[in-house]
Amino acid sequence: MDRQTVTERSIERRVGSEVFNRGRVYLGQGRVENLSVTATSATATVEGSEPYRVRLELTASRMAGECSCPQGGESAFCKHCVAVALAWVAEAGPLPLPDPDPTPEPEPAPGIDDARLRAFLATRDTDWLVEELMRAAAAAPLLRSRLEVAAGAEVHAVLDVERLRHRLTRAIATATEIEPEAGDFEGILEELDELVDAGFAPIALELIEHAFDLIPSLSEDAPAAEYLSSVFQRAHLRACAHCPPDPIALADLLVDRAFATSLLFVDALRDYAGLLGETGIARYRERVTAAWRAAESGDLDDEEADYGTVLELREQLAEIEGADALMAVLTESEPSNRNALRIARALVSEGRDAEAVEWVRRRLEQRHVDTDLCDLGADCLLRTGDRRGAVELLWPAFLTYPGLGRYKALAAAAGDHWPRWRERALTLLRESLARSGGGGVLVEILLWEDDVEGAWRESRGVTLHDGLRLKLARARGATHPADAVPVLLDRADREIASTGKHRYSRAANYLAEARLLAEQGGESDKFVRHMARLRAEHKAKSALRRYLDAARLP
């Protein structure tokens, strides 16, 4: 590579035109994802036959590349590295190589830990400490306020609480008209955090509860409502942790706010359980139980609480009390799949794997097939080494929702025993697909197993979605390049005929990829004739011509 800078041209000179073009095609197809760059390095994921992790680094002499693909070791510079390098250059421009002999920065002097600093301060005289503290307070207004309160001043006399209250009121009042993140909330939340850290948590709680008074005025489906509820609940929890309130008062606040609006504290009990303690939980249970009895008897006042909210609070209370309490509440009626999963997870969290598996099996016997339940039961069995039981639990989900994900789960559960299960799985899959169609699932599975020939066979007469058709063609192209060319040409034609900012760029990339395969398959002349027809058909499209020329296509 160029010693001074890395450019597209220097990348091509290093790897050659074939690898360079493949990398450029990958970039044009949007296969480079999660690109993250610093001044001297870049990382990204490139979607190939599977996701590959790429890391690039600028050294004094060149750009070093490392890729997780079979060809991309520490010294190789594969097509995936090329794709990421081109993305980096496109984002940052020519990349200067670092100075070969940089002057090392001096290491910072070691600091002094708290114990040593405290011991030092204990040796200072009072006048010196006072002067240092006054100097620090001049630079930190909240420290000054804290010292003034300690000296006897009233909190509201030294803190401008009304200014922050006014900002808070205005921000919430206008939150329905703007994206909440774009308003004043970030600054307000930072000030609340600073109050908490400076020892003024009660003032922060006062302001946060003022926000709670205002939030119900928003429509529950307003864009800002969920955001505001979430951030101010987190601020409230943090302030409570620094200044624990009376547990009974806290329980009443949580219940009252949840009853008043579904926006606040409906799902907060687990977060606050430690602060509530036994006393607060008992009060919470008393309030929720009374509301539930009123709901069952039809005496629940809709203005005081909503039936759904009371039910949710009751279920959360049972959840923190343990799996048996949760099961008792959720099985009062036929549990939904979601609630069945909550019960199973609660059993697992208490180390009761055998009971969780039995619960899952009973649900399956009742013909309630739920993939999450099956996965959880299988995990329990795998922890005990029962692979056969795990596979048998996963079968119903596989038959009900046949697909690559379910097939992978079966293979992982079977482990070394997978070969004898595999044929049975494929047979059942073929029978299921024969009834319902969707042969693309089998093609996807065989591709995952690297059985490209089998996938190609199964694809005959089957309609594949565009992404899978292209993936199969590329895999086939590794051994039968001529078979892949028509698929790429078809994709290019469709891009040219479509609308969109980057359609011509994508078309040129597909055509460049097709050219490489045509050359490998001995069909260069045929490809040249195709390009001649394509250029003639679209000769009025000057923008397309520019992309074709830039890709050096005939």
Image: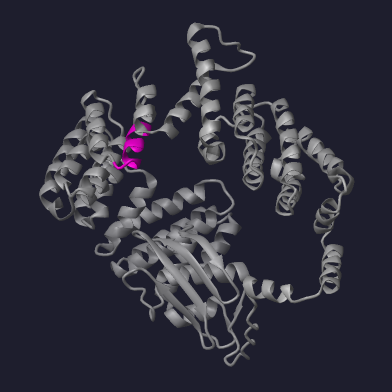
Left or right of 443? Residue 74 is right
Q: Is residue 101 above or below residue 114?
A: below
User: In this view of the protein, can residue 554 be seen by the observer?
Assistant: no
Front-lying residue, 127 or 311: 127
On the image, which quarter does residue 88 sit in?
Answer: bottom right
| Residue 61 pos. (x, y %) | 52, 88
Residue at the far bottom: name it. Answer: 101
On the image, which quarter does residue 2 sit in?
Answer: bottom right
| Residue 342 pos. (x, y %) | 38, 33
| Residue 524 pos. (x, y %) | 35, 68
Front-lying residue, 491 or 385: 385
Q: Main secondary structure of the magenta part?
A: helix
| Residue 252 pos. (x, y %) | 62, 27
Residue at the far top: name it. Answer: 298
Left or right of 115? Residue 392 is left
Q: What residue sits 82% from the left and 43% below the top?
A: 164
Q: Is residue 119 above or below residue 51?
A: below
Residue at the far left: name it. Answer: 420
Front-lying residue, 467 or 488: 467
Q: Is residue 17 magenta?
A: no
Structure colour scheme: one colour
Q: Is residue 163 above or below residue 300?
A: below
Front-lying residue, 218 or 10: 218
Q: What residue sits 14% from the left and 40% below the top?
A: 427
Q: What residue sits 39% from the left and 81% below the top?
A: 75
Q: Is residue 349 magenta?
A: yes
Left or right of 300? Residue 52 is left
Q: What residue sits 24% from the left and 24% below the top?
A: 367
Which residues are the magenta region?
A: 342-351
